[in-house]
Image: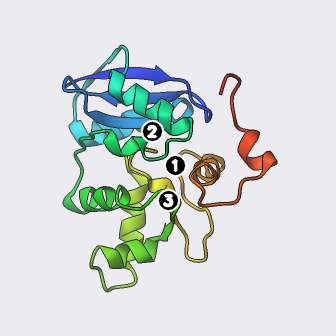
Amino acid sequence: MQLLLSRIPSPLDEILLVSDAQGLVRALDFSDYEARMRRLLREHYGTYQLVDGPAPAAVAAALSRYFDGDLAALQTIDTATAGSDLQRRVWKALREIPVGKTVSYGELARELGFQDPRAAIDVGAANRVNPIAIIVPCHRVVATGGDLKGYAGGVHRKRWLLQHEGALAKTTESFEALRLPGF
């Protein structure tokens, strides 16, 4: 499988975007988590080849609009993932969490129809290996009580994304300190 790797600047650091020949997003992660992204690609697709190139124009434009404040822009991006049935169900449910809202792992498990309280652990595990950060908004899942735990891109980025989306109060120290020059 040949996939296109694009590097996109963002307020949170450089984003690595992986897309296929049809322009579907297969992975999105931060440049300092490239090894994790490559591991997930290997787990999902086996043998693959990454070729550097430009991001699909519509995807790059939607990401730019999102970071500029059009928080609904990511809903227009088409994605494709492998993964288990449970993982794909969780990732689909993540895209249904409204912008500006958060849910707990337990709430998400119940929303998916699980009655056993321990199902939150399985939902958390699926969330943890989500290959498409931001677009499949795993950052909107928090611990019971609202604690910001378990974001593969770093809790500081999870906080920034939730503040950007209006789910947390914005503070100069935590929100603006991560913004890179030019954004």
Residue 42, x across and y down, in percent: 29, 36
Residue 46 shows in this picture? yes
**How far apart are the alpha carbons under marks 2 and 1?**
9 Å
Q: Nearer the viewer, residue 103 or 28?
A: 103
Q: Residues within 10 Å of mark 2 (few under 14, many from 20)?
A: some
Secondary structure beneath label 2: helix
Say which of marks 2 and 1 sits in front. 1
User: Mark 2 sits on what residue?
Assistant: 36
Q: Which mark is residue 82?
A: none
Residue 132 shows in this picture? no
In the displayed orientation, state which residue is furthest to the front: 70
Give the mark nearer the N terminus: 2 vs 1. 2
Secondary structure beneath label 3: helix
81 on left or right of 121: left
User: Mark 3 sits on what residue?
Assistant: 140
Say which of marks 3 and 1 sits in front. 3
Q: Nearer the viewer, residue 97 or 120?
A: 97
Q: Which mark is residue 152?
A: 1
In the displayed orientation, state which residue is furthest to the right: 173
At 39% across and 71% down in the image, what residue appears?
A: 108
Q: Residues within 10 Å of mark 1 (few under 14, many from 20)?
A: many
**How far apart are the alpha carbons under marks 3 and 1?**
13 Å
Give the mark nearer the N terminus: 3 vs 2. 2
